[in-house]
Amino acid sequence: MATSRDDGNHVSAWRPRVPGVVEVLHARFTEYAYPMHVHQAWTVLIVDAGAVRYDLDRNAHGTPHDTVSLLPPHVPHNGSPATPDGFRKRVLYLDSSRLGEHLIGAAVDGPDLRDPVLRLRVGQLHAALTRPGDELEAESRLTFLGERLRTLLRPRDAVRVPRRDPDVARRLRELLDERVAEGLTLDEAGGLLAAHPAHLVRAFSGAYGIAPHQYLMSRRVELARGLLLEGQPPGEVAAVAGFYDQAHLTRHFKRLVGVTPGRYRAGASSPYRRGAS
């Protein structure tokens, strides 16, 4: 992750290990104004404080807090603060695998999308992208974000009712069970199971009441519990059970078990000691 500060401005940028995401940018600017420029990727912008004014295809736009701005590739735009204190923004740059270039015209016509579900999904995706080790969750959230954007840009595509598919759900569960520590991406699973990633997530969630990334994380925590009961230290357990690092293990372990791995390991044999005394 690249981070810089200059005269009250602050920028953090990184490229996550999530297919389809070219770059993530979190920034605060007080006076800086972007000149006219273009991107090769789709720009998904939310503003958390202040506001931005910008021109896209010679038309003026703005970014109130409840808006998601979608700037298409190859179309020139600029940007400048619309409030005295500047603005704080979070940006996703997505490649054409998530949004096809056939949607550019619709995005130029209406780049500012006021949709609470979309805004929520963008925020959830940003949260997942800041946590190393949660790439499968991020990929799942990105899949639904792309689906929502396509629905808003092409409403006629939204009338399809998702079909139930218990067979593909079962096969995805078996695949996750085989690769608890190794893990896999939704794109990999889609290739192996000949199904679209969005269909995989919907089928799995409909069949088991839990998203694939939640299922995988619960299996990893289950594996970690067994290793901790065998006396292995949390740092080694994290690597063996498929977590990014010990902090990643601790966060999910405490959320699912109620205590940290260290406390769990320390208290694992205490009932036997009390019984023997």
Image (spheres, rainbow, N blue to C red):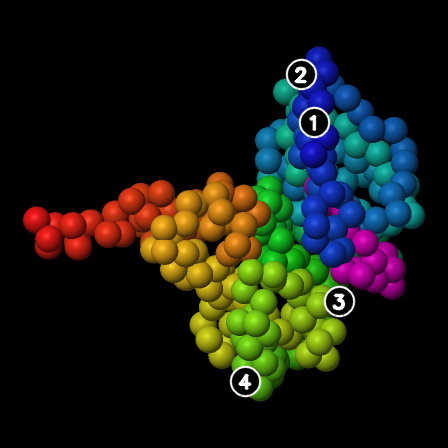
The crowding category of the residue bearing disc 2, from other C-alpha atoms within 10 Å (few below 14, some 14 to 19, many at least 20), is: few
Q: CA distance from mark 4 to mark 2?
A: 53 Å
3 vs 1, front mark: 1
| Residue 240 image offset from top left, x and y in percent | 52, 54
| Mark seen at residue 166 | 4
Q: Secondary structure at mark 1?
A: strand
Query: The disc labelled 1 sits on which kind of residue?
Result: Thr
Question: Residue 26: where, in percent of width, then height?
Answer: 67, 34
Which residue in the protein does label 2 denote? 8
The amino acid type, in three-letter code, at marker 4 is Pro
159 lies above or below 28: below
Tell me which corner region of the image, top left, top right, bottom left or bottom right, holds residue 51: top right
Residue sitting at 87 percent across and 29 percent down?
35
Q: What amino acid is found at the position of numbered circle 3 in the picture? A: Arg
Q: Residues within 10 Å of mark 3 (few under 14, many from 20)?
A: few
Task: Quickly name the residue at label 3.
Answer: 154
Under mark 2, the amino acid is Gly
Report, in whole angstroms, how far the alpha carbon at label 3 lies from the one at label 1: 37 Å
- Mark sitting on residue 3: 1
